[in-house]
Image (spheres, grey):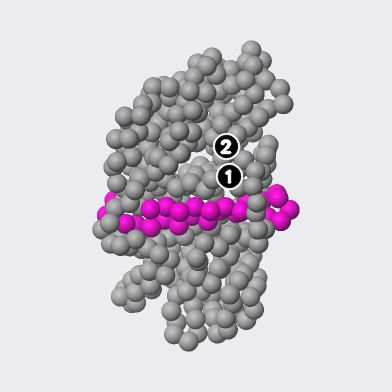
Amino acid sequence: MRKIYLLILIHFALNWGGELANAQSQRLVLLEEFSNMYCGPCVFYGPRVTSFLDSNTTKICCIRYQVYWPHPDTIYLQNPNQVNDRISYYGAGYVPIGYEDGNYWSSETYNITQSSLDTRYAMLSPFSISVIHNLSSGGDTIFTRTKFTKTDTASGHLLAHVVVIEKHVNLNFPPLHNADTNYNFIMKQMLPNSLGIPLPYMNVGESFVLDLSWKLANVFNTAELAVVSFVQNNNNKEVLQAGYSPTRTTFNYTGIEPVNLINNIFIYPNPTTSTLTIHQDNYSPNQQIILTDVLGNRVYSQALNTATEMIDISQLSSGIYFYEVRSGLDSATSYRGKFIKE
């Protein structure tokens, strides 16, 4: 049984363009910054930090958390709980403070240097991450798809994070004692929560695909939405790799935009409470979907007789589940991913 399971995973990784075994990946550095509208140094040095980030877009991405001191600002009040969770996670005690790849470097954000970034960027990563996002036809929900591929050995309590950011926020009026109305790389929502999701066990060369969605709230401009995904070792807080889906001006409104995916299969919503919808752009007959729990136990299966089908999962307990779409002809896995039942 173990050998069969590994063959399925390897087949999945190869079909999804998995990296060659033991071939480390180019790193994308992540900067997490804590800031505040009423913080004088944040306002003064903010444009300098933004300029630094904009001049190194191929090397670094950023998530900014607006905090509650010296005073709770407008953006902080839109999502205080998740901001507070990240404050507690790092023990951030002042602003502006930045954390480069978690534990690699931390200081006042304006102290970040090109040398520090270049040194970290040159350190190869044991993961590659690709990220895409799309909006619903009504423009009220964002769908994200992140593929995590293990390209070299890695250990620790590894967590997958997916974060929706608004790259540019332009307020209609400046906050008190601050003439600045422009804010950048603002965290809007951490999916499915601020704690992240444990990565399943993967051999080198294998991939894990995470589909998530969020009904938009407190977004100023949907054209400024972007997504940052990253893997973090919860044991020491090191960020092992980041991935970035940049802002988009056009959307196809059919789910996650296909990027050479097998059969262009979409499963939504994710997380879900009672039903899953599965859609295949290139549907073929004699297929079935199989759901398993984190222990590998089969909990549900169903034949797929049409290109779009709805699956009732209301009977399942809350938790993390995996799904596989298999061909009835050779039982080969054509698609495998994960969803959360709330």
Q: Is residue 89 visible?
A: no
Q: Secondary structure at mark 2?
A: strand
Mark 2 vs mark 1: which is more N-terminal? 2
Instruction: Determine which of the numbered discs, if any, sits on residue 247 in the image.
Output: 1
Which region shows up in magenta? 128-156
Based on the picture, tell me whether residue 85 belongs to the magenta stretch: no
Q: Position of residue 28 (x, y in %)?
A: 39, 43
| Amino acid type indicated by mark 1 | Thr
Would residue 272 appear left or right of 231 to someone viewing this image? right
Q: Position of residue 213 (x, y in %)?
A: 60, 53
Would residue 34 appear left or right of 103 to someone viewing this image? right
Q: Is residue 259 visible?
A: yes
Image height of 121 relative to 77, above or below: below
| Amino acid type indicated by mark 2 | Lys
Would residue 135 appear left or right of 294 to someone viewing this image? right
Magenta span: chief secondary structure: strand
Please name the residue shown 43% across and 66% down the image: 16
Please name the residue shown 34% across and 61% down the image: 19
CA distance separating discs 2 and 1 = 7 Å
Instruction: Determine which of the numbered discs, if any, sits on residue 167 in the image.
Output: 2
Binning the other alpha carbons within 10 Å of mark 1 as few (below 14), some (14 to 19) or many (20 upward) gives: some
Instruction: Please tell me in which quadrant of the rendered image residue 81 appears.
Output: top right
Q: Secondary structure at mark 1?
A: loop
